[in-house]
Image: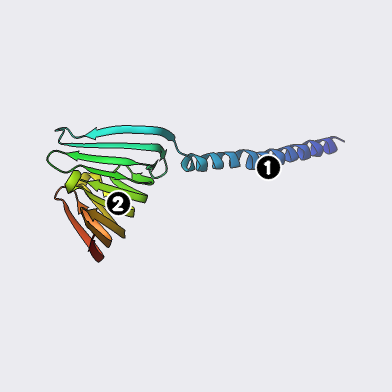
Amino acid sequence: MFNHLRSSVLLIMLVLIALLTFWVTNAVVPIITSQGNDMHQKPDYIIENLSGIRANHESTVQRNFSAKKLLHYLDGDVTYMEKPYFANIEIQKPIMRVKADKARLSGEGENVYLTGNVKVLRGEDSEKITMMTSYLHLIPGENIAKTNKTVVFSRKNTTINAVGLELDNHTGIVQLLSRVRASDY
């Protein structure tokens, strides 16, 4: 009888250990896994209706920015903006304004990728140049904008269509890369 009681207790202990193992595997591990994944799939912060100014120490360059919504993701240190607007103001240089439907910024904003109805205005009044495209890569530290998509330029009575562009805002030089067509109206 003592052996029978001893084997029953051992059997009950084995069943309890098996149930506990089953519970830990199915209840605790999926929660930890899903929290780990969600942390990188959900933004760590969201800001709505933001605007700001970034200036260098000598105050020779000032960059204004605004957006309807900003979402920052921990995974990859990526920031997304809805309805972004950027203005680059530099002493004795034409002001450059850029707006788009969306933007993706990497790191501290070293690279800005604009998509959807990208519009660039450079200069004022009679010297104003307007550029439209679907995609634009800004490199703010170098004051460069480039794209490999279709671009439409307008200045005074001239319209230029091209595929691909590189614009250096320091020098004002614009390189149109291919399929360039110009027309006066």
Residue 34 image label: none
Q: Circle 1 sits in a helix, a strand or a loop, which is it?
A: helix
Using residue 71 as the reference point, say whether residue 181 is left or right of it: left
- Tell me if I can see residue 57 in this picture: yes
Q: Quadrant of residue 23?
A: top right
Residue 108 showing in the rendered view: no
**Where, quadrant-wise, is the N terminus in this rendering?**
top right
Residue identified by numbered label 1: 22
Quadrant, the C terminus: bottom left
SS assignment at label 2: strand
Check disc 2 and report the residue beneath it.
137
Residue 126 place in picture, x, y as percent: 17, 47
Side of 58 relative to 22 (left or right): left
| Left or right of 75 on screen, residue 88 | left
Q: What type is the residue that disc 2 sits on? A: His
Within 10 Å of disc 2 (Cα), the crowding (few <14, some 14-19, many 20+) is some
Q: Who is closer to the viewer here, 135 or 16? A: 135
In this rendering, which labeled residue sits more in front, label 1 or label 2?
2
> Is residue 43 or residue 65 the one in the foreground?
65
* Residue 173 % position (x, y): 16, 54
The residue at 60%/42% (across/down) is 30
Q: Residue at x 20, y 39 (%)?
A: 89
Amino acid type at mark 1: Phe
Image x and y of residue 178, in percent: 25, 66
**Residue 132 vs residue 83, the one in the foreground:** 132
Q: Which quadrant of the figure has residue 26?
A: top right
